[in-house]
Image: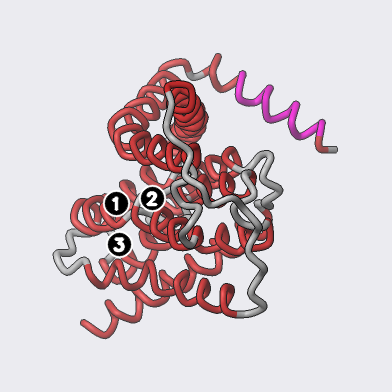
Amino acid sequence: MHRFFSAAAIILFMVLLLCFPTLSIQGASAGILLWYKRVLPVLLPFALASHLMLETNLLGRFSHRIYVILMGFLCGYPMGAIWAASLTRDGKIVPEEGQRLLWFCNQPSPMFLIGYLGVQCLGIAETLSILAAAYLPPLLFGCLLLKRNPVKKAETDSRFIPLTVISFEKAWIESCVILVKIGGYVLFFSMIATYLCQLPFENPVWHPLLVGICEMTTGTGLLAESVLPILHKGPLGLFLVCFGGLSCLAQTAGCLPGSGLKTGSYILAKLACALCSGGLFYLYLYSRM
């Protein structure tokens, strides 16, 4: 059955490419520009820095979970997953703790929440409420996870390893591989979102919600253009961004091979936290009316 659906999906994608070449080019161009202008400049430096830290064992004397949390919340998707998977693969943390960190540390960046969702899409100047609603549920969830049944720290060597040309090149190549993977997912799901935008939806909720579940940036952009009141736009937009859409889920899954971390429970955790974030923001907006 899995083979049948995989083959059907590939054939359908090929048919869409042949039947709608203009839309396909438009979607691919939008995806490439999104990756080049927004994803690459932000993630590549952080990916390189994180791999250099791993190559030199710079974090050997410090708490690795702190770095995963900081990178996951400050740098945006999928830096939390990259760190959790890399440290698990290298034996810096045990798989159980890596899985727990993955559940709540892969979050949208503050700049995306404030600049794109808050200012551009919703026109909200008081963006502290957006950050609070977005980050409180995963942080509370994370506190419960890390305090309950703490796992034993993996035994690792804490000695610093001097940086060499070979280790720098290894870090650079691994960083580029990750960003190329992410670019492929962004391009693919931007094309799918472009196809979905052509569907004859009249409902102002389901259209941006369906597109946003596929690719969050495009979906929140459609939501901003809809006739919905801010009381509905805000929570729906925050839900889409905190969930990340299929594109961010695929990017996260692409960072996990070889680490033993699972995506199924991660998706459920993201969905639960995103619903809580949307609900909190709705209560905040409702209280301000």
Q: In front of the other: label 2 or label 1?
A: 2
Give residue 70's position: percent from left, percent from top: 39, 58
- Whether 5 is among the magenta residues is yes
Question: As shown in the figure, which amino acid type bears the numbered disc 2?
Answer: Gly
* Residue in view at x 49 percent, y 44 percent: 57
Quadrant of res 12: top right
Specify whether 282 is left or right of 105: left
Q: CA distance from mark 2 to mark 1?
A: 8 Å
Q: In front of the other: label 3 or label 2?
A: 2
Q: Which residues are magenta?
A: 3-14
Give the answer, above or below, for where 261 lies relative to 285: above
Q: Any mark on residue 137, and which?
A: none
* Residue in view at x 67 percent, y 51 percent: 261
Query: Does the image show residue 289?
Result: no
Question: As shown in the figure, which amino acid type bears the numbered disc 1?
Answer: Phe
Q: Contact, CB < 8 Å: mark 2 with mark 1?
A: yes
Q: Which residue lies under the disc numbered 2?
A: 76
Which structural element holds mark 2? loop
Q: In the rendered image, which quarter contains the C terminus?
A: bottom left
Residue extending farthest right:
1
Which structural element holds mark 3? loop
- Whether 205 is among the magenta residues is no
Q: Which residue lies under the disc numbered 1?
A: 112
For this rendering, which residue is in front, 80 or 233? 80
Mark closer to the chain start, 2 or 1: 2
Question: As shown in the figure, which amino acid type bears the numbered disc 3?
Answer: Leu
Q: In front of the other: label 3 or label 1?
A: 1
Mark closer to the chain start, 3 or 2: 2
